[in-house]
Image (spheres, grey):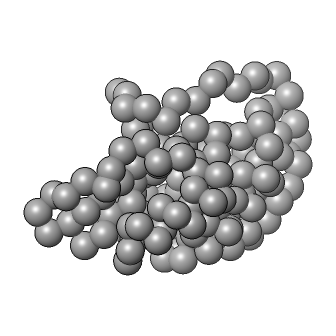
């Protein structure tokens, strides 16, 4: 039996605003935007390479705890390829992201970390 990553799921107090940022920042496509019976807005997105990224708000019985874009145990970040770190850093910070670390030289690659909306930690990787 093989296991493929099915999706990434982000939580946001404003899922549509969050999804719109990912559309502008990384050319995501919004597939649907619905209010579910559980009381949460659910926005299904797709990245350019076909990865499903779901963004939803709290259900009617939930309150979201504050996120953290810092280094931590558990799911810490997800990485996205970049053709030019400096131009992507400038573009993303203009969209409201915050550069946290880098650029860092690591042999044949360069990386950096940014805080995206809702305290999502992302890594950009330039090969």
Q: Quadrant of residue 80?
A: bottom left
Q: Quadrant of residue 54?
A: bottom right
Pinpoint residue 39: horizontal percent, then vertical percent.
87, 36
Residue 49 falls left or right of residue 119? left
Quadrant for the C terminus, please: bottom left
Residue 77 appears in the figure: no
Residue at horizontal 41 percent and vertical 37 percent from the top: 75
Residue 42 falls left or right of residue 102? right
Residue at horizontal 65 percent and vertical 22 percent from the top: 65
Residue at horizontal 49 percent and vertical 36 percent from the top: 69
Residue 94 appears in the figure: yes
Pinpoint residue 114: horizontal percent, then vertical percent.
47, 48
Pinpoint residue 85: horizontal percent, then vertical percent.
38, 67
Q: Quadrant of residue 24?
A: bottom right
- State whether residue 20 is above or below residue 102: below
Q: How many marks?
A: 0
Quadrant for the N terminus, please: bottom left
Residue 28 falls left or right of residue 35? left
Pinpoint residue 89: horizontal percent, then vertical percent.
48, 61
Q: Nearer the viewer, residue 65 or 70?
A: 70
- State whether residue 126 is above or below residue 124: below
Residue at horizontal 80 percent and vertical 32 percent from the top: 59
Q: Nearer the viewer, residue 19 or 87?
A: 87
């Amino acid at each position: 039996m093989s296991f493929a990553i099915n999706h990434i799921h982000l939580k946001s107090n404003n899922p549509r605003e969050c999804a719109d940022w990912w559309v502008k920042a990384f050319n995501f496509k919004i597939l649907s935007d619905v209010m579910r019976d559980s009381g949460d807005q659910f926005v299904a997105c797709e990245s350019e390479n076909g990865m499903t990224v779901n963004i939803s708000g709290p259900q009617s019985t939930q309150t979201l705890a504050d996120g953290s874009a810092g280094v931590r145990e558990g799911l810490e970040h997800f990485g996205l390829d970049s053709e030019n770190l400096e131009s992507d850093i400038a573009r993303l910070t203009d969209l409201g992201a915050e550069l946290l670390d880098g650029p860092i030289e690591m042999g044949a690659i360069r990386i950096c970390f940014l805080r995206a909306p809702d305290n999502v930690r992302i890594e950009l990787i330039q090969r």
